[in-house]
Structure formats: structure tokens, C-alpha cells
Image (spheres, helix red, strand yellow):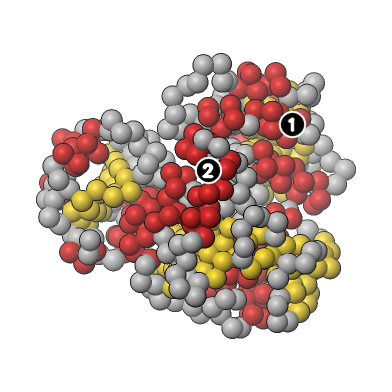
Amino acid sequence: MNLKDIQSVYFIGIGGIGMSALARYFKFIGKKVAGYDKTQSPITDELVKMDIDIHYVDNPALIDTNYKDADVTLIVYTPAVSKNHSELNYFIHEGFTVKKRSQVLGIITKDSFCFAVAGTHGKTTTSSILAHLLKETGTPLTAFLGGISEDFNSNFVLEGTEFSVVEADEYDRSFLQLSPNVACITSMDADHLDIYGTDDELTKSFREFAAKLKPNGKLLIRNGLPIDGITYGIEDASDYCITNIKVEKGTYVFDIKTPFELLKEIRFNKPGRHNLLNGLAAFAMASQAISNTKKLAGALETFKGVQRRFSYQIKADHLIYIDDYAHHPTEIDAVYEAVKEMHPDTTITAVFQPHLYSRTKDFIEDFARSLAKFDCVLLLDIYPAREEPIDGVTSLWLLGKIQNDNKKLIDRTELVNEIKRCKSDILVTMGAGDIGLEVSKIKNELAYAN
């Protein structure tokens, strides 16, 4: 498929974070863009402001005629969409070119120098840091991000086409569509077992991704993962290693040892050792193509962050409120440890919305263990996303597993009152579902109350 021959692009699931970045790309290069999503959101509102037509009812009759010429129209869909989706089946039946988001991403980036970030945790933050570092060194890049970067105020960056930055998503084996020049694997914890079945199959897929490198490509691996590559880590024998860590007024100060030099007194403002690793991974990736390592290291200090990735909503003497996308036990552990490192001797209330019935079922004991660490635990109902309910898999089941006397299953209408009841020094909201839509309401009500 030659993108030059395409005049119109129609997205099924256009409001997804990855899909919306592609929609922005095609709009920027002059294509007609429209789409469907089941839910109106801040993301779809932003796309509409760009003159992208979106409707929210699955009905082929609502598709504009500009997108009904199979010869010049590309259909892009997310694997989260049901196979019974009427519009998807209409386009398939009518002989349109229909491709998954990952396939289109592979086509767009194949002729660029491609940086691809893979891993079950850390993809969005690492790729956002990488895009920031490259921009700060004047590198002409296009970036497709899995979150809203606070540096770019977008999930899409277009500063040139010579280099590209993408998230290599393991869900549905999407990352096997990419052919990167420089790739990174941040983590390989068991996840998406509804797709892979076993942890071994997930690991096998990551190995297949590593084999997708272009000739002379470079693979960065967090130290300890069972794949060969250039390693990175903290206070260990990695090829790229952070040493001499200090915390000064909430900012990390550290050195980076590379295979070629020692860079001293580097500063980084995102809390958590997991974020230190994300920053190091981004630096190590960028340094495979950019020779000015001192400028790359210096740019780490100016990285602002990604929305919903350890994002401070309130930072006052009476209350600290942090919002995070954490939806896996390992991620919840990382948030807890980051809070305790940056704010020792405090009490913490955790509000958690489980994401997917299958993930809750697969990791029920780990979720319970991770959540039990907090001083107060407030659970919302499971966010189903693409899934149908699984018999017996509920937030009430998870609540019963949590070894903590100060816990409660609540309705979202009760959120603020229950948060106040817990009377903690720090509030953390976590989850990958629609809990993010509650953040501004919680922030405003808590700020007003104090």
C-alpha cells in the first residue's frame, strides 16, 4: 500500500490514545480524516477541533461519502474493537483496504530511522522522554506516543520525518509489525494473558520482536531480562548504569556510566526508581544515534512528564494528590515505592479502578498484596474496556483478598467523601480505565475544601 495514493482515512476507535496520534498524523499530512468511537472524550473533542468528523453510534449509514470510495480510502481499526462491529464489517465486505493500527504504524515508520520502545511497563514515559531528548538536540523526528506528553501537550510530535519514535505494544502482538533501528525492552512481566495464555508465550513474542531489528540495529535491555542486548540499570554492572543517586528537594541527582564515558551530576525531576530507569533507557537509546551525550543528559532535567504518569495534581502542605495510570501489580508497587521515597513518614490513600476482568482474575493475589500496603484502600468497580464480564470476577472479590482493615468498595459518586474520610497525607488515584475522567473533579473539590 502506498500512502501517497490514499486521499481519505477512516478510524474505527479513533478516540484511543494510539489511534488519535495516527489520526493527527494523517490530518497533518493533508489527508481527509474521520472516524467512529463509542465514547466522547477530551481526546475526541480535541480531534473535532481539528475538523475531524467523529460520530458515536456504530452505523455505516453515518459514514460520510468522502470515506466510501474503496480505491482512495484507508480504514484503520484498533484490535480493541469487536469483530461484530457493523462499520468494520461493512468496510471489509465492500473490499476496502482495512488495516490494524500497528500495521499502519509499521508502514509509516519503515523508511525512517525508527526508535521503538517495548515492555509491559514504562513504554509511554520512556518514549516521551526519548522524543523530548531528540527534540532538544535538534533531531528531526515524528513521534507517536501512548499518552499526552506535557512537553508537547500532545500524543503526537511532528518535527521532521528522518527519525521516528513509537511505542511497540505487545498487546495482540502488535509490535511485530515494526522494524526498528534502535529498540528497547523495559520489562517483560506477565500481562495480556488473555492474548498469550502463558508467560512463556509472552516471552517468546518479545524475542520475536527483538529479531525484527533492521540490519546493524541495536537492542537495549533492562538488566536482568532473559534476552541478550545492551543492558541498562541502577547501581549494577550494566552497560549504561546510574550511580551515586541523591535526592535534593524532590529531584534526583546522579551520574551515568556509559561504555565510553562518565557523565556527572545529572538531574531528573520525575519521582520513582522506575522513572529513573525510563530516563536512562531513553538516554541510552538516543545515544545510539546522537553523539552529543552531554546535551542528551542535560535534557533529562527539563523533561516535564506525561499526563497520568505520577502526575502531581495537588502539592501543598496539607495534601499531596498524585494520579497515575498504574493498572498492573508491578506498577502499583512502583507508585507506592516512589511515594515513600519522595514523601517518607506519610499516610497514603489509594483509589484504584481495576482494568479488565481477565487481568484482575490473572493477578488477583498480586493486586491484593500490592494494594494492602496503602493505609486506606478505596476500590471502584472493574473497568471492562473490550471485555465481557467473567463470572465471579468482581472488585468485591478483590476487596476480600486485600489484607487491610481500612478498605472499601465504593461508587464513584462517593469518591470525594470517602477520600476525606480516610484523612491521609497523600492521595493516589490509579487505573487505566475512565478513572482519569474523575481526576479534575477530585482535584477541584479537594482544593476547594481546603
Query: Disc 2 on helix, strand or loop?
Result: helix
Q: In this view, does 366 lie above or below 218?
A: above
For the image, the number of numbered tags is 2
Q: Quadrant of residue 447?
A: top right
The residue nearer to you, when weighing 219 against 425, is 219
Can see residue 124?
A: no
Q: Is residue 22 above or below residue 440?
A: below
Q: In which quarter of the image is residue 125?
A: bottom right
Write the residue at 66% across / 55% down.
225
Q: Position of residue 404 (x, y in %)?
A: 79, 24
Write the residue at 20% across / 41% down.
92
* The label number, if any, that marks residue 326 in the structure image: none
Amino acid marked by disc 1: Arg
Amino acid marked by disc 2: Glu
Q: Residue 370 vs residue 293: left or right?
A: right
Disc 2 designates what residue?
201
Mark 2 is surrounded, within 10 Å at the Cα level, by few (under 14), some (14 to 19) or many (20 or more) other residues, namely some
The residue nearer to you, when weighing 300 against 96, is 96
Residue extending farthest to the right is 345
Disc 1 designates what residue?
369
Q: Nearer the viewer, mark 1 or mark 2?
A: 2
Q: Residue 167 vs residue 96: left or right?
A: right
Write the residue at 45% across / 62% down.
212
